[in-house]
Amino acid sequence: MNISLHGRALLLGLLLTSGAALAADGAPRPAAGVAEAQRPGHAGIASANFLATNAGFEVLAKGGNAFDAAVAVASTLSVVEPESSGIGGGFMATLHTARGDRDAFIDARETAPMAVNPKDYLNPDGTPNRDAALKGPLSAGIPGEPAGLELLAKRYGRLPLSVSLAPAIRIARDGFKPDPRLLGAIRDEQKNLERWPASAGKFLPGGKPPAEGEVWRDPDQARTWESIAQKGADAGFYHGEVAQKLVDAVRAAGGNWTLQDLADYRARERAPIVVDYQGYKIVTAPPPSSGGVAIAEILNILRGYDLAKMDQARRMHYVIEAMRRAFRDHNDYLGDPDFVKMPLDMLLSPYYADGLRQSILPDRATPSSMLPHESARDPGMHTTHFSIIDKNGNMVAITSTVNYVLGSTFVATGTGVLLNDEMDDFALVPDQPNVYGLLGSKANAPEGGKRMLSSMSPSLVLGKDRSAVIGSPGGSTIITQVLEGILHFIDGDSAQQITAARRFHHQFLPDVVYVEDGVFDAATSAQLQKMGYTLKPREGWGFMNVVTWDHKTNTLDAASDPRRPSGLGKVE
Ligand code: GLY
């Protein structure tokens, strides 16, 4: 049996352009569901750390809006949750402004240094060098976080950075008690941190990981945020003393950054992906994230089924098959839109989804090996997400990352800046298996100045009666977790129910359904296995942070993932 994909090759030939209009259903875009006049009158913030959530409220109390609060939350997470995101990493933000009812997207993804050389990520025998890709300065892209936060503050916020960065600076300078997850990350990475004196100096005070309950300070990071607060990101980070220290440290440890790489970095505004599903408008991340395209493709496939009328096994069957097809496409086509022409018009078209739907059998799994494809990849596992709605109805979803736990584990001397290991999100070695034994696609091959593909999917779900700000960490599982969160929300679930819901994931290859304990009842599991699915238990699902807004009662609800006890969702 061979399952052909309806017109895929033909459409691809016709549509090899990156479309400016990113509407995912081809229809004229209706006005957002949220009435411009409506204001909640109170605010909700959900993040992975209570200190960061409280920092956001502190800045709201100073007269800031959701976007100023986002600067406070992101910079505070850099201090208190450095294992996931931070000043040496990057982020993606999906925004909705109450005034003007406008949706926007900020891409503060890292870029490859101009001197990037794929050979640096190979062992002498030609096999991938996992250590170079994941640890030390060669694994780090040029950070986007400072430029992105400044762009967010200047274009959308009300307050100067000196106010919105104040909580992070204070917490880094005065100290805080790290939560068990950060302490565990430092213990797990101790050997790598010991490889670089500034990393050991920051994370191993007195030569060992901080003890539980001990106050831990990061005065170097406080000074770097202060430099940005006083001089702006350009003069305070990408040029001048901090830039010189970053480049000196990277080059002394075998990396290849130059001052020009830092000077050339720009955060970008891009048109978000927009898709309508069951009366809701979903606003999500465009490339260089694969997340929004995949979510839109999955929803476009699912709109052809009446899922509410199906039993759980049949419903899961269609959701998994839609995931399988969307991941196949994201592996093959997507990359940095400034470098790669992508068939977005095709991938986001309802006709393309119609064709994919016809390839789904009603009662049987489609083996991934039967779908034509070129490659597959799996980006890193760590990352953080937070969600905010302010009293005026401004909304922001930010997913931020240094990639793997504690990024590259490399701290640049005298800056407190922990560098990301985002270079591993490129297909570093063309036509060679990556560190997961999977082949990478050409669209995501590394080039100087290029952004590596991401799965980050910060999303807004805008409806007439209810709206939500939603997102998750979790590497490639970000996409499916956010999709499942969106479906739960549309089914009427609360923020608490969405964050607590058990999850599952299929990413085309490997051809298995990863399942969280308890996600399917025994009968559903048995039926899915009978249909040909391999179910594989998996731990370590993303920490979702969600804020919802009920427009009828005009109330907000904020929930942080119960899998992460130090998180906090709060409404005030
Ligand atoms: N580093 C994880 C991602 O960007 O998807």
Image (spheres, rainbow, N blue to C red):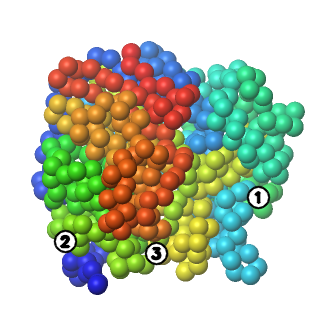
What residue is at 24 percent from the left and 34 percent from the top?
492
Task: Give whichever of 527, 368 is nearer the camera.
Answer: 527
The front one of 135 and 38 is 135
x then y, percent, for residue 409: 71, 49
Q: Which residue is mark 3?
A: 375
Q: CA distance from mark 3 to mark 2?
A: 23 Å
Q: Nearer the viewer, mark 1 or mark 2?
A: 2
- At mark 3, the secondary structure is loop
Residue in view at x 54 percent, y 65 percent: 426
- Residue placed most toward the observer, 480 or 253: 480
The residue tagged 1 is: 251
Q: Quadrant of the N terminus?
A: bottom left
Please determine whether, in this image, residue 48 is positioned above or below residue 359. above
**Where does residue 16 sit, x and y in percent of width and height?**
30, 75
CA distance for labels 1 and 2: 53 Å
Mark 1 Cα-neighbour bin, 10 Å: few <14, some 14–19, many ≥20: some
